[in-house]
Amino acid sequence: MSVVTDEPKGAVHRSLVPARMDRLPWARFHWLVVVGLGVSWILDGLEIQIVSQAGYQDSLGLTTAQVGAVGSVYLAGEVAGALVFGRITDRLGRRKLFMVTLGIYLVASGLAGFSWDLWSLLVLRFIAGTGIGGEYTAINSAIDELIPSHYRGRVDIAVNGTYWGGAAIGAAANLYLLSDQVPQNIGWRIGFLIGPTIGVAIIVLRRHIPESPRWLMTHGRQAEAEQVVDDIEDRVRADGAELEDVPDSKAIEIVPEKSITYRQMARVFFGQYPRRSILGFSMMVTQAFLYNAIFFTYALVLEHFYGVSKAHTSYYFFPFALGNLAGPLLMGHLFDTIGRRKMILLTYGLSGLLLLVSAFFFHAGVLNATTQTAFWCVTFFFASAGASSAYLTVSEIFPLELRAQAISFFFAISQGAGGVVAPFLFGHLIGGQNNPHPDRTPLFWGYVIGAIVMMIGGAVGWFLGVNAERQSLEDVARPISARDNGGGAVSAATT
């Protein structure tokens, strides 16, 4: 697999592409990027919520274990898609892959609505998952590289937080589609078509989003990179903005690389940036553990300990989703102003502390379904912003040439820890469903563990975090292809 270049191997060129992109004011072009690329998280939240209601169980004659397998297969597809497409994204470019991965999702998710048995559903859910997993790597890379450094944190965090907007849409749709007003064998099939319908509209927008000029710059396609930036600047000027000239002193010298080997990746992760690798691992795993522990068992808790009927648990989900959505939208800008490390410590620490307090109230039996949900809302207002900052962190603290692969690597780890271990563990802590006087102690200790894990993630973020706010990506992590690459990145805790 080769990459087309317009310069001979080993040629050195000076580029102002990063500096020109970072000095741009906010314009309609950036809204196009946010809307056109940010929809991926909405689609994932929608998919998870549609599937979690299991409206297809009776129609296809599935057992509870088989329903669980459908959810697990989707998560496995996300991991596989992230790892495979992350590598390809770094080699072939962001634009090609965010078109391909969305197309894969559209087709597979739409066809899942026509599933006729367990195996057809499993195969199509796995393929749809690969598309969404690939989306994460391609679109997060593109957003970071197209958004000016002044706004990168708030945009990335807000986009990642929109997962919960999608989950709320899915829950609202299920209230109607899985009700008695819609035939049982029809409602869930329509649900699988909601995401593709949104995706078809978005794929039209994506045709107007260019390739990342930063990616072109590091792959020897300097002329194309300059042309893309010229076009973006023309769009910004068309909005009435005046752009100052960028001094030549801000140029970066690049020696293009065709591809990055796995050996080079290992040297970057464990040789050049071991502290950052620990940071990424800690932040991603701790937030995933907390999230999946609560999200995949909240309905069981409401049913088992508070006597809420299964049909009514969706009503309690809406305020839970609202808190999760509001956190990143309202707090995202603080990661650009107050700073990454301070906000990571604050969001992780407060969410862990609030969960710890609610655990003691839960154990004392003083909460009801409403107050328990209220605690979750406030807790995840902070936790959602923190979790979104984990995705922001792993996408900006490693060199451009392996950005998508870094995202896929840590995403796969977090899904393994959070998507498998946490729901399994907390499901067992809840215990049997037929006990009229359920024991709260095991789940209490589960909540305590989840709270401590989250606070540990915040502490690691404080001590090992990178002050990347308003910094150019090339200053946060020098490109591998930069001629002066010798550890010139922003220091981990002191700058």
Image (tube, helix red, strand yellow):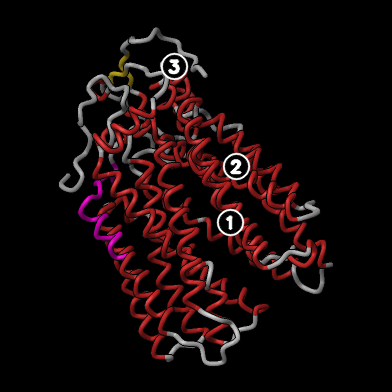
Count of labels in the image: 3
Q: Quadrant of the C terminus?
A: top left
Mark pair 3, 1: CA separation: 41 Å
Which mark identifies residue 221?
A: 3
Q: Nearer the viewer, residue 233 or 297?
A: 297
Q: Name the residue located 76 percent from the left edge and 53 percent from the top edge.
A: 113
Element on which disc 1 rests: helix
Q: Earlier in the sequence, mark 2 or mark 3?
A: 2
Mark pair 1, 2: CA separation: 15 Å
Q: Where is residue 142 drawn, in percent x and y?
A: 46, 36
Disc 3: CA contacts within 10 A as few (<14), some (14-19) or many (>=20): some
Disc 1: CA contacts within 10 A as few (<14), some (14-19) or many (>=20): some
The amino acid pointed to by label 1 is Ser
Check contact, mark 1 vs mark 2: CB within 8 A.
no
Residue 459 magenta-highlighted: yes
Element on which disc 2 rests: helix
Which mark identifies residue 131?
A: 2
Q: Earlier in the sequence, mark 3 or mark 1?
A: 1
Q: Where is residue 347 drawn, in percent x and y?
A: 33, 63
In magenta, the rendered stretch is 454-470
The amino acid pointed to by label 3 is Arg
Q: Name the residue located 61 percent from the left edge and 38 percent from the top edge.
A: 205
